[in-house]
Amino acid sequence: MTMLNEMNLKTIMWIVPIIFFIHEMEEWNILDWYHSTYETPPPSTKLSCRLWLWAISLWGFLMSTIAYVIPNESISAMVILVLIVFTILNGLQHIYWTIAFQKYAPGLIGSSMGIIAGATVTAMILVQHLVNPLYVIVLYLITVPVIVQTIRAKNKLTKIFYRIHLFAVKISNCFEK
């Protein structure tokens, strides 16, 4: 508890986007995994997948930068918690996929590190009373339907992931012209 109480949010929070970036780069060849795992793989190309991985990584650093420049530490904590909860959700999905498909799901190692880092920063935020615990509970509860969708989808893409892949393909088509 003492260690968590002495941590500086504006310093420690940077571990979240760094680990998230490592996680996303671990997924560099995830299209091969989709093709070997999913009943109907996404309509993606390697380029579209990689553009998405870079874009979502940049989003993680953008969220952290916004949290960093906000002078009010409580508001900063609220912003970084959105990124933390997102990364923990994605980590839980990777753990589920590894168990469900009984094979390594690219991103498992980085996202597992992200769960540990995110839980640590969340605990620090709560110990330092930077946000109302109810805010944290609500953020984490929002992930439950997404986890349920992931489990129900089995070896198919959820609708949101399908849409993300379609969007990434459209973006990559602009680069290929």
Image: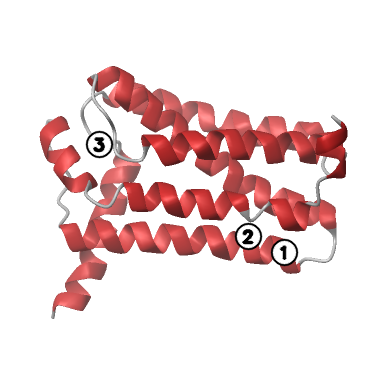
* Mark 2 Cα-neighbour bin, 10 Å: few <14, some 14–19, many ≥20: many
Considering the numbered disc 3 on the image, is that residue within a helix, a strand or a loop? loop
Report if the CB atoms under discs 2 and 1 are less than 8 Å apart: yes
Instruction: Please state which amino acid type lies under the numbered disc 1.
Output: Tyr
Considering only order in the chain, which callout, 1 or 3, is on the residue closer to the N terminus? 1
Q: Residue 71: horizontal and vertical position, in percent?
A: 83, 66
Query: Is residue 132 visible in this depiction of the protein?
Result: no
Q: Which residue position holds label 3?
A: 157
Q: Residue 117: horizontal and vertical position, in percent?
A: 61, 39
Considering only order in the chain, which callout, 2 or 3, is on the residue closer to the N terminus? 2
Considering the numbered disc 1 on the image, is that residue within a helix, a strand or a loop? helix
Q: Which residue position holds label 2?
A: 64
Say left or right for 129 vs 162. Answer: right
Considering the numbered disc 2 on the image, is that residue within a helix, a strand or a loop? helix
Instruction: Please state which amino acid type lies under the numbered disc 2.
Output: Ser
Between marks 3 and 1, how big is the CA–CA gap? Answer: 34 Å
Say left or right for 77 vs 118. Answer: right
Q: Which residue position holds label 1?
A: 68
160 relative to 49, above or below = above
